[in-house]
Each structure stands twice: as C-alpha cells, then as structure tokens.
Amino acid sequence: MGISVLPYLNFAGNTREAMTYYQGIFGGTLSISSFADFGMEGMPADGTMHSELVHELFTVMATDAMPGAEATWNGTRNYICFIGDQPEQMIGWYDALAAEGTTDQPLEKQVWGDMFGVVKDKFGIEWMFNIALPEGWAQTQAPA
C-alpha cells in the first residue's frame, strides 16, 4: 500500500449531500458509512462517519463533525490525511507534529481495525493518521 496523502473534509452534518454533489460533478465511485454502520453510540445514527469519493485520478474523503464541534467553527474544517501501512514512519510523523502541537485524538486502534489519531500542528493545521497495522503488530508497539 505505501503511504498516501488525501484531503479529508469535515462538514456540519451535510456530508452525504456534499459528497453526492461532488460525485455528480466529478464522477467516480462514492461510498458512505454511517455512525450506525459502526455501532457508534452517542452519534447521530444517520450521520456520516466516513465517505470516500474515488476517481481514477484522485480520492476525496469526508465526515460529519462530532456533535458540538460546529460551535467552534464556521463552515467546514479540512484535514490532511495520511493513510498507509508503515506504522513506524507514520507514528514518528504523528509524534513529531504533536511535539509542538496538540493531540486532538491519540493514536489508538479503532472499530474498523486500523490505528487512527488526529493532531493539530503548531500552525493550526489538523492532520489525520489512519494506519493499517501489519498482521502480528503488537499493541505494545503502539504509542503510549
């Protein structure tokens, strides 16, 4: 797999509408998973946990904001998202960005099986890391 960098858009509850709109413009294959699909309690069941528009030339991903997050921002938030299967390198990048930034979500194994975390760097840019863990990866190798 290697490592990819992708835009990850964060909407105030209208991700499905926005991504369907983008698919109408760009074409491609759109997949949308709700919070209910992953059994996420405390989240709107029909809210979008993850969506992905895959075009032959690019991929755009998006999600609905966590409840209450829209009170802290106007419009949409954008993330830079690393997706890959090289945990040592990606954890190093996450830790380096967090060293002078803030950890929004610690790197932890998630319900979809990958390690995921979010960090805001010292300039206010938010970075998502989704790491596909190799088989046999010991949780003890994960960051503290």
Image (cartoon, rainbow, N blue to C red):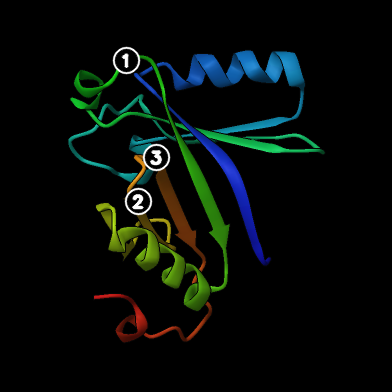
**Mark toward the viewer: 2 or 3:** 2
Dot 2 corresponds to which residue? 118
Q: Amino acid at mark 3?
A: Asp
Dot 3 corresponds to which residue? 37
**Toward the viewer: 50 or 123?**
123
Is residue 45 rendered to the left or right of residue 31?
A: left
Q: Residue at x 34, y 19 (%)?
A: 12
Position of 131 relative to 68 (above/below): below
Q: Amino acid at mark 2?
A: Val
What distance separates the C-alpha of mark 2 from that of mark 3?
Answer: 22 Å
Ranked by sequence position, the earlier of labels 2 and 3 is 3
**Toward the viewer: 11 or 5?**
5
What distance separates the C-alpha of mark 1 from that of mark 2?
Answer: 20 Å
Residue 115 horizontal/vertical position (percent): 40, 64
Position of 41 relative to 24 (above/below): below
Q: Residue at x 64, y 18 (%)?
A: 22
Residue 74 horizontal/vertical position (percent): 32, 15
Q: Residues within 10 Å of mark 1 (few under 14, many from 20)?
A: few
Dot 1 corresponds to which residue? 74
Q: Residue at x 34, y 36 (%)?
A: 35
Q: Residues within 10 Å of mark 2 (few under 14, many from 20)?
A: many
Secondary structure under the numbered disc 3 in the rendered image? helix
